[in-house]
Image (spheres, helix red, strand yellow):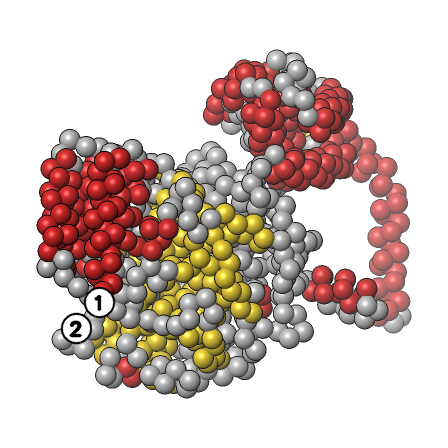
Amino acid sequence: MTATSRSANRFARRLLVTALLGGVAANAVAQAPIVQPGAPGQPSRQINAEEAADLASIRYSEADVRFMQDMIAHHRQAVDMAALVEGRTNRDSLHDLARRVALSQEDEIAFMEGWLSDRDRSVPDDMAHHNVEEDERMAGMASPEEMAALEEAEGAAFDSLFLELMIDHHEGALTMVEELLDQPGSAHDPVLFEFTSEVTTDQGNEIERMTAMLAGFSPDPRVNLAAGFLDAGQALLNMELLTSLPKPDGFFDPNNPGGLPMSRLNEEDEEDGQQEEEAEEEQDEDSEPRPALLNFANTDIAFAGNVAIAGNYHGFNLYDISTGDAPQLMSSVVCPGGQGDVSVVGDLLIMSVEQTRGRLDCGLQGVAEPVSDERFRGLRIFDISDMNMPRQVGAVQTCRGSHTHTVVAGPGEDGRLIVYNSGTSVVRDEEEMAECSDESPYRDEDTALFRIDVIEIPVDRPEESRIINRPFVFSDPESGVLAGLWEGGDHGPDTQSSNETNHCHDITAFPELQIAAGACSGNGILFDISDPENPTRLDQVIDSGFAYWHSATFNNDGSKVIFTDEWGGGSRPRCRASDPDTWGADAIYDIVDNRLEFRSYYKMPAPQSEQENCVAHNGSLVPVPGRDIFAQSWYQGGISVVDFTDSANPVEIAFFDRGPIDEEELVMGGYWSAYWHEGLIYGTEIARGLDVLALTPSDYLTGNEIAAASFDVDETVFNPQQQMRYEWPDEPVVARAYMDQLQRANALSAARAAALEEALDRATARLDEGAEDPATATELESLSAGLLRDSDGQDDRVARRMTALGETLSGIAIRLR
C-alpha cells in the first residue's frame, strides 16, 4: 500500500468516528453551562445560548444610550428657543427658521424616544433639560442666564441673540456626534449611525444658513463684498487706497496667478472645454496651508528711509517709495525657503528661512535628501548696498529654521548686531546639524525645544555670524524645570486649545526700554533684555480664549502691549458672524510694575464669509501724539485702524476691506502686514501684491493729527519686531494735534483755543520764512505756562495732553528766538 493510500484510509476512519459520535458531542455541548461572571465579588449567572449570542453581537452600547438621552434634552432646548420667536421679531426669515428647527427637532426627538423604548431604556421627561447642572450641560446648550436673556430680548437684539445661541446649539450637536463616533464600539447600530449622519448634514446646513442670516443683520459695508482676484468689491471708512501694485513677474504662477485651488481651476477649464484631472488634497481643520499654496505668498515688510523691502516665501522685492503713493520696483531677489520675513540694518538685510526646501545657494530645485549639506534653514544675510544686485554674504543654520527674527541690539562700538531667532518648525536631523535634538527636556537638556536662538552678526564680517546662546526662556525659576510654562491643551469647557509653549512665534523688542514682548504659542511673555545675550522673564500670562499667541506690539511709551491670537493658523475663516469676538482677536495689556495686566479684547467687527481667511495678524503704531493708535491686518478681513488710548475700550476709527478672492472656495489671501511709514500705510497682500493707503481726516482723527504722525524722521528704519520710541518735533502742527484732542474732550475753552490758534498762525508763518519772532515766542511761553499750571487736577489723559501741548509750545518759542 502506498503512503498516499494509507493517509486516505486514516482520514476516512476519522470521518466515520466523527459521524458516529456527532450526536453525542452535540448533546454534551448543549448541556454544558454558559456562565456570565459578575463584577468582582459578585456572583456569576448562567445564561442560555440565545443570550450569549446577543452579547457576542451587541447592537448598541451604553455610550449610544447616553448619546440618545442627552440629545433628546439637547433638542428640547432648541424647541424651547424656537418657541420664543413668536411675538419677539418681525423678520419672516427668523419665523421660517424657527418653524424648521421645531419640526426637525421634534421629529428627531420622536425617533430617539422610540429607539430608547424599543430597547427598554429610560426616556428623559419633557422637563429634564431644565434641570441639567452646569458641569453636565451638553455642548452648545444655552445656560439658564442666556435663556432668560433671550426671553427678555425683543426686535434686533432678540434676532442676533437667537441666532448666536442657536448656532452654538447646533454646533454643540455636531460636537456630541463627533464625541460619540470617537468612542470605540459606539454607533454600530446601522439605524443609529444613519441618524448621526443626518444630524451632521442637517445641522451643518442650518448653521451655514444661520451664519449668513446673522452676517446679513450687520449694516457694516464690509459684509458680503463681491469676490474677485483683481476686481473684488471694496469698502472703506476714513481711508483711501492710493496704489495697488500687482506682484512682480517671477513671484506668481503665470498659469494660476490668483492661487485658486485645483478644483476651481478644473471647473474653469471644463467651462472652456479643457478638462483636466487634478485632485485637491484635503486639509485638516487645524493644519497649516499646503506649502504649494504659499510658495509665492507675500509676507512681512521692512523699511529703510525711502526703500520698502517686502518679504515673500519666494524671496523679497525692493521698492523705491520716495514718491510715497507710487512705489517703483527696484529689484526682485529670488531665494525660496519661506517664510521670508525681513529686517534691515544699514547695508545688511536679514531674512528668515524655515522650509526644508530652502537651499544654501538660493537654488529653485529644493533638496530631495532627508539629510543634506545643501539644505538651509535659519537666517540669511544679504548685502543690499547695491539694491539692484543684492548678494548673500552670511548664513546662520539653526535647528528649527527661522519663522521670524528680531533685531534686538546694535550695532554698538563692538560692531555687532544681536538678533533673536524664533524657530517654530520641526527640529532638523542630528546628522544634518549635530547639536539638534527634538527630545523632551526631561530626557535631554541639549534639546532644541524650549529655547530661542541668540545670534551675533558682525556688521563688517557677516560671514562670521553665529549662534552665541540658546537660552531656555520657558523654564520654571523655582523648580528649574525647562518646560515650565503652558503644557498645551485647553483650559476647560468652552475654552481654546493651544499648543505647548516650547517656542516663540514673535518677539518684539523695545531696546530703549530694555524690554521685549514674546508671543509664545501658549503664553504671552514680558522679557527683560537689559543683557541682550541673556534675556530673562519678567512676567507671563495665559488666556483661555487664545489658540496661538502670534505677535506683540508696544505703545510708544512701552506702558501697554497688544498681543494677537492667530486662531486657525491664518488659513481659516475665523471672523464669521458666529465666531466669538474674543477668539482670533487682540488682547490689550497694561504693563504695571513689570507685570502684564489684562484690559480688553478687540476684534475686527464686520462679519466675514466662509471664503475669507481672517484672524488677527501683523500691525504697527500710527504715531499720533497724545494717542495710542494701531493699524492692523486681518488677512482677508482687511485693515483696521484702532484707537486703544483707553486700553479697556478700544475703538475702530478707520478700515479698508476687499471681498474674497473666489466666490466659492477659500483661497489664501488678504493682508499679511499693515504698517505705517512716514504718513502712509503699506500692506502686503498675500495673493495680490502691495497696497498703499492713506488715512483721511474724520471726526475720529483730524488732519492735524495725521500730519503730526507723518514727519520724515532721519531716514527712518522700521523693522517689524523692533520698536523705537517716536519723538515728535516742536512744530505748530503737533501743537494743533494736541489742541484737537483737548477740544474733542471739551477741555479747552473757546478763548484759550482762539489765543492758541492766533499765536500758532504767526509762529507758522515766521518758521516758514526762517525768521525770528521774540514777541510771538514770549506769547507762546505765556500760553505754555498757563497750560502747565491748569493741568493740575485734570483727568489724567487731559493732563498729559495739556502738558505735552505746553512743552511743544515752549519748544516752538525757543526756535523763534
Query: Of 158 and 277, which appears nearest the observer?
Result: 158
Which one is in front, 817 or 744? 817
Image coordinates for residue 279, horizontal then vertical, percent: 71, 64
Q: Which residue is mark 2?
A: 412
Residue under pointer 1? 409
Quadrant of residue 790 within the rendered picture: top left
SS at badge 2: loop
Residue 655 picture location, percent across and down: 48, 49
The number of numbered discs placed on residues in the rendered structure image is: 2
Is any part of residue 279 visible from this angle? no
What amino acid is labelled 1 in the image? Answer: Ala
Q: Which residue does the image show at 47% across and 77% down from the upper left?
A: 329
Residue 769: x and y, percent?
22, 65
* 2 and 1 marks in contact (CB < 8 Å): yes
Left or right: 705 with respect to 107? left
Residue at figure coordinates x 54%, y 75% from the top left: 248
> Which three-letter amino acid code belongs to the residue tagged 2?
Gly
Q: Gap in Å between the C-alphas at discs 2 and 1?
A: 8 Å
